[in-house]
Amino acid sequence: MKPNQNVPPAAPANPSMPEEKSEPAPNQPSAQVIIPKKRTFPKALMAVIFFILILGIGSFIFLRGRDGVVNGPETTTPEHVFEEFPDFPGIPINDSTISFVKADGKFCLLYKGVIYLPQDSGVLVPKSQEETEEMAAFPWIGLVDAPGDINGTDEVFSFKDSPSNNSFVFITRWETSSGESYHMYRFFNNNISELRIFRPDNGLFYVPKLNLFSLGGNFLNLSMFRCPECLTEQPETMLYYIPTGDTRNIGKVSHFEWSEDDNVYKYKQYEEGVDPAEMPIRTNEFFEQSEELLNP
């Protein structure tokens, strides 16, 4: 028997039921829930960002700790806080001017390309360094001009700030056609004044070095030497009352200190070959009569 090629396709098993469709029934939720994909960054990209961040922080810390400068599109200098002196405009600054600035709470002097910082306690020589491009841009204020006939030594010889840090005294060493001289100046209360000039004809010990302010700032202890190259020798001690210029020479001492009362001081006399510990401490007053001290 040959197969019937015209046989129609078989009918569904249950012709009375319609074929099921995938559409959901009316008012019924869909059986298929679509969950949105969470957006994530590729791990490789996250690693690159983290590496750049760490590299940037590390570079900042290294540069800041090395010299206080962070390299960027332009080289910048560290920020400083400068105290202003609106009531003291100063004098015009030229190549022969000693000028000052108070940067970050510290007085500094500038003279002929050299920056001077106040002497530390017990040190007779001011700290100094060459002026840098950054320092040259500081808001310097002119104080005094050097003589026009200098033909030898020309420097800031001594420099000391007061205990209150609101004034300072400095001494210059100038050699001119008139000879060698040491000029002592004081800046206080928006005013610069010349306190005294020391010359060889003042006596054997004529070379002054600022040593110690009294606690109230009224008095100075000056170490007086025979020559500028004799700083390792034992000096004599001159006490100087700033408001009036009164002085007292107490000779060579191995120990000196100002009392809380500005007018009173304690010292030990120096004797060659004698242990300073064996010397008695003496107490004295600058003004033996009870005078009312002037404001510093």
Image (cartoon, rainbow, N blue to C red):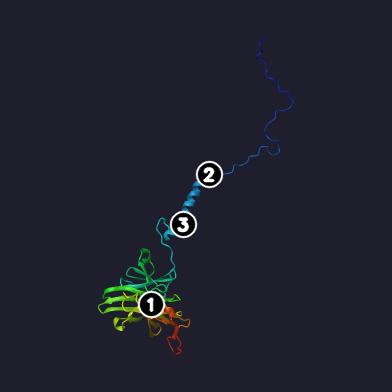
Residue 202: x and y, percent?
Answer: 31, 83
Task: Kindly report which numbered mark, 2 or 3, lies closer to the viewer in this rendering.
Answer: 3
Describe residue 49's horizontal placement relative to residue 245 as left or right.
right
Secondary structure of the residue carrying numbered label 3: helix
Task: Kindly report which numbered mark, 2 or 1, lies closer to the viewer in this rendering.
Answer: 1
Residue 183: x and y, percent?
Answer: 33, 78
Describe residue 197's horizontal placement relative to residue 31 as left or right.
left
How dense is the environment of label 2, judged by Cα within 10 Å: few (below 14), some, or many (20 and up)? few
Q: Quadrant of residue 116?
A: bottom left
Residue under numbered circle 3: 61
Residue 52: x and y, percent?
Answer: 48, 50
Q: CA distance from mark 2 to mark 3?
A: 27 Å
Residue under numbered circle 1: 210
Q: CA distance from mark 2 to mark 1?
A: 68 Å
Q: CA distance from mark 3 to mark 1?
A: 41 Å
- The residue most toward the top is 1
Amino acid type, callout 2: Lys
Residue at image position (32%, 73%) is 155
